Image: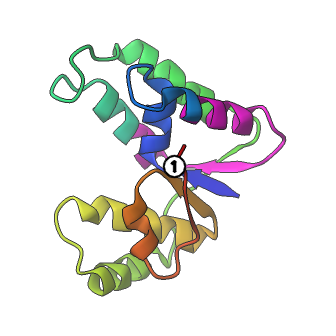
Amino acid sequence: MTLCDVNIYIYSFREDVLNHAFYSSWLNELLNSNTTFAYTELVLSSFLRIVTHPKIFKKTTPIKIALEFTQVIRSHPMGLSIMPGARHWEIFKQLSKETNATGNSIPDIYLAALAIESEVQFITADKGFKKIKGLDCLILKP
């Protein structure tokens, strides 16, 4: 089972980003398959924060349209919502120490801990995740 990073959703959704067609095709293939995939509302809320942010995109996505995209993920019959469990915080703390996490890397470590605890493959376009010990990670690049 896989868990997508926020960048996969953004790149597949926003037509004005580099390599949109590649990421859109990849996500559509996942959504049109009979493969169960995981999602977390933390990633979906980050998606909303980024695509509606006027300092990130000159032309922001209207919240209604962005929410419709998240609903496609949340209501998909093969989608499984995952949340941090009993072991998450300990995994998060250990990874934070091992990677000497600071600032913007903290949310990444949090997601990595969730993927490790849930035993899912993490799909991202961010090669920085490769350095996280114990994370089954696929760096998705065109």
Q: Quadrant of residue 111?
A: bottom left
In the rendering, at what x and y percent does residue 102 appear? Answer: 18, 70
Residue 25 colored in magenta in the image:
yes
Q: Main secondary structure of the magenta part?
A: helix
Query: Relative to 103, is 70 above or below?
Result: above
- Looking at the rendering, the stretch of residues picked out in magenta corresponds to 23-45
Q: Is residue 129 left or right of residue 28?
A: left
In the rendering, at what x and y percent does residue 142 appear? Answer: 54, 43
Query: Relative to 96, is 46 above or below?
Result: above
Q: Quadrant of residue 92?
A: bottom left
In the rendering, at what x and y percent does residue 45 appear? Answer: 38, 38
- The residue closer to the viewer here, 27 or 87, is 27
Residue at the front extreme of this rendering: 142
Residue at the right extreme of this rendering: 34
Residue at (50% x, 76% y) in the render: 86
Q: Describe the element under mark 1 as helix, strand or loop.
A: loop
The number of numbered badges drawn on the structure is: 1
Residue 91 colored in magenta in the image:
no
- The residue closer to the viewer here, 29 or 108, is 29
Circle 1: is it few (<14), some (14-19), or many (20+) Cα within 10 Å?
many
The amino acid type of the residue labelled 1 equals Thr
Q: Where, quadrant-wise, is the N terminus in this rendering?
A: bottom right
Q: Quadrant of residue 105?
A: bottom left
Q: Which residue is mark 1?
A: 40
- Residue 46, can we see it? yes
Query: Relative to 5, is 10 above or below?
Result: above
- The residue closer to the viewer here, 113 or 27, is 27
Residue at (42% x, 76% y) in the render: 132
Q: Is residue 38 left or right of residue 57?
A: right
In the rendering, at what x and y percent does residue 59 appear? Answer: 26, 13
- The residue closer to the viewer here, 89 or 49, is 49
